[in-house]
Amino acid sequence: MDVIETVEAMAASARASVRAGERVAFVPTMGYLHEGHLSLMRLAKEKADRVVVSLFVNPTQFGPNEDFSRYPRDLEHDLACCREAGVDVLFAPSAEDMYGRGYSTYIDEEEVGHQLEGQYRPGHFRGVLTVVAKLFLIVQPDVAVFGQKDAQQLWLIQKMVNDLNFPIQIVSGPTQRESDGLALSSRNAYLTPEHRQQATCLFLALQEAVRLYQAGERNVYMLRKAMMDLVEAQPEAQMDYIEVVDQETFAPVTTALKPCVALLAVWFGKTRLIDNMLLVDAGSA
Ligand code: AMP
């Protein structure tokens, strides 16, 4: 596995791949890798000759009071994971190299990008879309793989690719979970044992929404109420939002007549968790 630490060297490697006619699949990450990331790497391997993974804790997607400085990092572990997954290139640039002095160009999706996560984390998706666009231009992949775990991010990246004509196919991978349903996340490392136990309420709430939907419930007030009751039953849970949106447009709906996504963001102490599930009829999930 090549470990590349500068934008210049990564761009040169990308040009060599293009010249060699290799099909490249790309998996962007912020590191502290877990089975969710590894599942995307495996998917990437199925789609291409060469797999590039980036490891970059992107400062521009964190708000001033967020967890950028304490975001978990473990380079040795991440290197071992990538080697084991058969990754060809690990691209781990520095923030200084990605955002040179006086950096001032950003990509912002002005509608969905300012709702839900974008409303509670102002500027978050502007940072995400900017870094993903930069990484796409540096790595020049044919395919890029993202997790359904971050459903709004996935939607926005597909939108950016469509709007800005990036010649890149976006592929999504299903959310990988712990045995009790908690979605794997690098941020789970922050949870105290007590919060960890209570955090299964995100999964339980989403599962209940799916169960009600599949039993014919289409009233979003009822679906949200059922989810809220399960989250609020946990003494330490503090909700940011629980929402149901149209899968295609990501617009909030009051009646779930088309396939929808139920999403929630919940705090446990200083740890903020997000999760989502598709609301589709049984058998079509
Ligand atoms: P992150 O390192 O958190 O920025 O995530 C990098 C990529 O991994 C994103 O495309 C995420 O959606 C994806 N991802 C994170 N957690 C999971 C999970 N539990 N299952 C599948 N993919 C995930």
Image (spheres, rainbow, N blue to C red):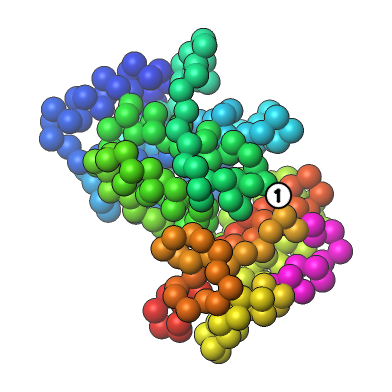
Q: Residue at x 51, y 61 (%)?
A: 251
Q: Position of residue 122 (x, y in %)?
A: 63, 39
Q: Which image quadrant: the C terminus? A: bottom left
Q: Residue at x 13, y 27 (%)?
A: 19
Q: How many marks can you see?
A: 1
Could you tell whether 115 is left or right of 98 in the image?
Answer: right
Q: Is residue 85 above or below residue 132?
A: below
Magenta stretch: includes residue 157: no
Q: To which quarter of the image does residue 249 belong? A: bottom left
Could you tell whether 179 is left or right of 149 in the image?
Answer: right
Residue farthest to the bottom, as pictured: 215
Q: Which of the pair 257/158 is nearer the observer?
A: 257
The answer to whether any part of residue 80 appears in the image is no
Q: Position of residue 246 (x, y in %)?
A: 48, 66
Kindly state the secondary structure of the residue where label 1 is placed. strand
Q: Position of residue 214 (x, y in %)?
A: 52, 85
Which contiguous range is marked in magenta? 227-238
Q: Which of the pair 275/115 is nearer the observer?
A: 115
Mark 1 within 8 Å of ligand 1, using the beta carbon? no
Q: Is residue 22 above or below residue 203?
A: above
Q: Residue at x 51, y 50 (%)?
A: 112
Q: Position of residue 26 (x, y in %)?
A: 34, 40
Q: Is residue 49 above or below residue 221?
A: above
Q: Amino acid at mark 1?
A: Arg
Q: Residue at x 39, y 33 (%)?
A: 133
Q: To which quarter of the image does residue 222 belong? A: bottom right
The answer to whether any part of residue 198 appears in the image is yes
What residue is disc 1 on?
Answer: 272
Q: For label 1, count other residues whose C-alpha is less than 10 Å away and answer few (under 14), some (14-19) or many (20+).
A: some
Q: Which image quadrant: the N terminus? A: top left
Magenta stretch: includes residue 233: yes
